[in-house]
Image: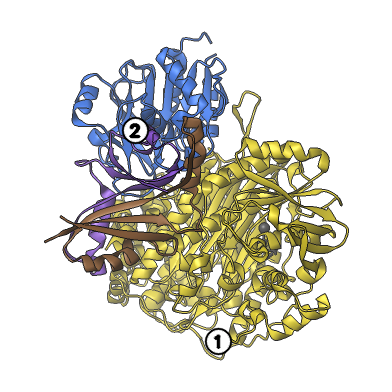
Chain colours: A purple, B brown, C yellow, D blue
Amino acid sequence: MAVKATVLIRPKEGILDPQGEAVENALPALGFSGVSHVHVGRLVELEIEDPSQLESMCEKLLANPLIEDYEVVTASA
Amino acid sequence: MAVKATVLIRPKEGILDPQGEAVENALPALGFSGVSHVHVGRLVELEIEDPSQLESMCEKLLANPLIEDYEVVTASA
Amino acid sequence: MTTAQAPHIALGLTDPEFELIVEKMGREPNATELAMFSLMWSEHCSYKHSKKILGQLPVEGPHLLMGPGENAGAVTVGDGLAIAFKVESHNHPSAVEPFQGAATGVGGILRDIFAVGARPIAVLDSLRFGELSSQRSRYLADQAVAGIGHYGNSIGVPTIGGEIYFESPYEQNCLVNAMALGLAPVDQLIKSAAAGVGNHLVLFGASTGRDGIGGASVLASAELGDDDGSKRPTVQVGDPFEESKLVECCLELLGKDLLASLQDLGAAGLTSASSEMASKGEVGLDIHVDRVPLREQGMEPFEIMVSESQERMLCVVTPELLDEVLSVCDKWDLHHAVIGEVTDTRHMKIYENGELVGDMPVPALVDDCPVYTLAPEEPTEQIYPAPSVDSEAARAARAAFDDNAQGILTALLASDNISSRRHYFERYDCIVGSRTTKRPEQAEAAVLHLWKQNESGAPIPGPSIAVSIDGSGRKVAADPYRGTIGNVLECAANIACVGGEPLGLTNCLNFGNPEKPHIAWQLTESVKGMRDACNALKLPVVGGNVSLYNQSADGPIYPTPVVGIVGGVPDPAVVATNTFAEEELFVGLIGPFEPTLAASELAKLIGDELPTRLPDLDLAKHAESLTLVRDAVRAGTIKVARDISEGGLATALAECSLGGVGATIDIAPLVERVSRAYPDAEPHQHARTALFGEGPGGIVVAGSREDLLALSNSAASMGFLALGTTGGQLLTISDPTGTLKEVSLPASEIQRIHGGALSERVSS
Amino acid sequence: MTRFGIPQFPGSCDETDTLLACSRVGEAELLWHKDKDLKGVDVVVVPGGFSYGDYLRVGAIPPFSPVMQAVKEFAAEGGLVLGICNGFQVLTEAGLLPGALLPNVNLAFTCRQVDLVVENVETPLTHEFAPTERISVPAKHTTGRYFAPTEMLNALEAEGQIILRYAEGHNFNGSVNDIAGVCNERRNVFGLMPHPEHAVDPLTGSDDGLKLFSSLASAAGVPA
Ligand SMILES: Nc1ncnc2c1ncn2[C@@H]1O[C@H](COP(=O)(O)OP(=O)(O)O)[C@@H](O)[C@H]1O
Ligand SMILES: [Mg+2]
């Protein structure tokens, strides 16, 4: 039976994240205040029959470990 | 005290998700089998003082409600 | 919307139209049939309000290969090559979702090009938004440009030119028009008429989902209200990756001669694509909706027939070639399905799991939509309010207006409609394909080299083409007839400036609601103007598009007939640039240019009312002058050429100095011409009009003294005026009337003002 | 004559431009992504574009294609490989080149003629240039900000693996140390963000990029 998995992929800490900055800078003009540490990453959701493959899929394909961290969240489908 | 929030942004159901399709089609060639329903979305993480603003922030800036659904997950910092 | 509304009304059909459908069918249509009729009888597909007046446009010319009626028009350009081209609008979808709206607009016009068998080689865009002081306009412009770039860049077709203007009448109704060009050997062009009873109908490309359902009839024909909420679920998302595979697949299928006909799916999806193929081929089609590859579960037959999912094509294939066609689709990883057959019934029959769910005579669906006669009525006074623009440039122009030419010039150079468009066009790949020999800002028109490859892949020289797209809305609002002529002449002047011979014209008529008499009048006058200008230039209209109902509670847009012209250029190495790159060149002005401040950029900055009439034009003289310029550019006599447009002569001269070399200019000859035209005006008015007045037909040229003096003899009747000499870092323009403070600006200062204004303004 | 092979992926854009550029200094042909056959070419040039739609992450999917498996073997044997723009991204994702490419600091696709300085002229790609020679080449991308962690960066600088830098004022994407192009330690695999294949003909803007291709052709050591 397939398992539902969610993978959160974030820019590695310390690497300039202009996307996060752009969001942070746009907020005050829209009337939002008190927001900080904005980071923009990627979300991959999928169903997988053999969840033991997930780790290697992240390493090899879904994330680039040089610039990104990932976190796998699974839940059975 | 600021609250840490994670926003998951997904392509709306029924709206074309070319990324998900492309990843799904590529996986078998990469040696991964039994993977389906792949969707690629965005992840925004931030710290916010007034989490009641999150909803309207998503509507106005973080997500494009015409083509994306979003889900807010908060946890205190 | 009331709940009691009849379905046909909700779908945009009138009661008499519905009755006519019942009469043609001999019964009431079912839901699937009604949905299909509502699309085919919409303005977008049937041209019911514009067909009659479009009939007067000239559609014949020595270079014409394919005229209106096919997916794109085409002209011969020499060496056995054809250029297919067309412009189309995606205004309403872009107002709702600018990124995807503009992206899918590019995707759609590209499909029209490869549907006729041509490889897309260039895109141009014509954009209109409200004033940049509006946050919504800044957002729409930013996202539309990003969307165009996303699609064009990703598919590997360069976006080589275009235009973008900001005027408040476009605040609620932005215009996003895209033009595409394709290259094909003349004998590879293909038409879309379905043929061969018993042949298969194959749908290939992306799968079909619910996107864009109701898009054509609702989004393209209804006036936009303040609340766009109800239209939200119909947003179409483009996938340039899918389309890049689709292009290659189609060209491979055509290159191997495997197709009987080919048609893209655009607005109105499968309904319009299939029924138009049937109509042109005078055949019938059976379509099995259950065979269509779907992206979503449980789609109704009508949903499948009207879906506007992007990146799909339809072709007709003989049974013998079917396997080979499907294997080419497989090679490119595209979905495909044989969804039906060509029949001799002249009916569109729609089946679901073998059961007949729709049966319509093809002529009723495609050809029998009533065609309306417009009821034009000339307004007694200007229907648009005086332009009002809130910007630093406008304040500066007002302060300088009375006596300071330099102040006016610098205000114009920094204004939203004149300053460098670099901020936007840098987001387009303008070079992919290795054909672009003149990029944006390098010449008045983009120039593309049509090299071919020898057996070992190396390029061998071929002919070249020039292409430009233009469409001032404000001048057409001032005078639909003469304003439209001005648009055609300006576009043609751009082509002439690079030595191009105009071969064909495409257009997109962006107007308000044609059922309103004043809009009907604008449309009628505008088309007359286009007709007369094309006739004078001996230029056939190869196709185009009409976008009506561009109005909101705030009123109609400026009437905006956008024209695109393709010209032939024999040698891309002999093309005039548009800046003074050399010292000691003689500078002159050619053409029957009669400047007026009416409806000009300066008039806008200071908030002048729009006039109701522009000066008369001698079309024959304009045509002759453009020929003269073209020939002199081709002969190498004219080395620099720039047509005078927004901001008048002074702005054109300043822009000529952007290359770093200035000039010393005396405008006395033009002031004299102006004072003859307006004998009652004051000297300062004469000087201001000569410097900043606008109008068609003026081209600033530079070349060697000898060459230009020789040209001035042959061009005396063309109104050649000697203006000065290039050289040094400074642009100085002296005022013979002594009433305005003269211009004296270093080229570097002109670069700074002109180059940086827009990016500063949009990021503030 | 040196034979160039240009892998073509679905979504490649600049493969024809690259083919034209290579055919000015040698022979060139396209290599289909589904084939593992490099057809015996002497040099591989991975072209620009949006291979596999740039989906998931630029350059992430192509390294797994059959043709790139072959290119990895070819590089391991010392074969000359150049990646341009998306090709550079693919080579870093494939692990053939150090570092990674991140979104431009201006977050927008930007197409601009830029000046570059040739930093190391002792490589197969650059041996025909004079030291610190300045060239004008277009760049066009959304994801061109070169990044390497500090330690890696220091090693690259020390080993002369920085081939090209943006001239002062021309680094619009925010690349670390103004890096526009790098090579591997062995100096047989190269990656550049700017597009020399779009600078091989004065008619289309500049021919400053041609020498990169002729350098590769002569370095491949194939008799003319
Ligand atoms: N303004 C116009 N001038 C000339 N021909 C036009 C104009 N508008 C539309 N046409 C022609 O009418 C035909 C139908 O147009 P359209 O429905 O936009 O084509 P498509 O089916 O490709 O979307 C096309 O051949 C087009 O060239
Ligand atoms: Mg069409």
Q: Which secondary structure lies at badge 2?
A: helix
Tell me: C480 left or right of C370.
Answer: left
Image coordinates for residue D165, horizontal then vertical, percent: 29, 31
Foreground pick, B6 / C376: B6
Image coordinates for residue C167, horizontal then vertical, percent: 43, 72
Q: Amino acid at mark 2?
A: Glu
User: Residue placed farthest to the left in the image?
Assistant: B1
Q: Residue at x 79, y 62 (%)?
A: C349
Image coordinates for residue C17, horizontal then vertical, percent: 73, 81
Q: Amino acid at mark 1?
A: Thr
* Label 1 lies in ligand 1 vicinity (Cβ under 8 Å): no
User: Residue placed farthest to the front in the image?
Assistant: A1
Identify the subunit bearing mark 2: A
Foreground pick, C36 / C221: C36
Where is mark 1, residue-wise?
C2
Foreground pick, C250 / D93: D93
Tell me: C23 left or right of B74.
Answer: right
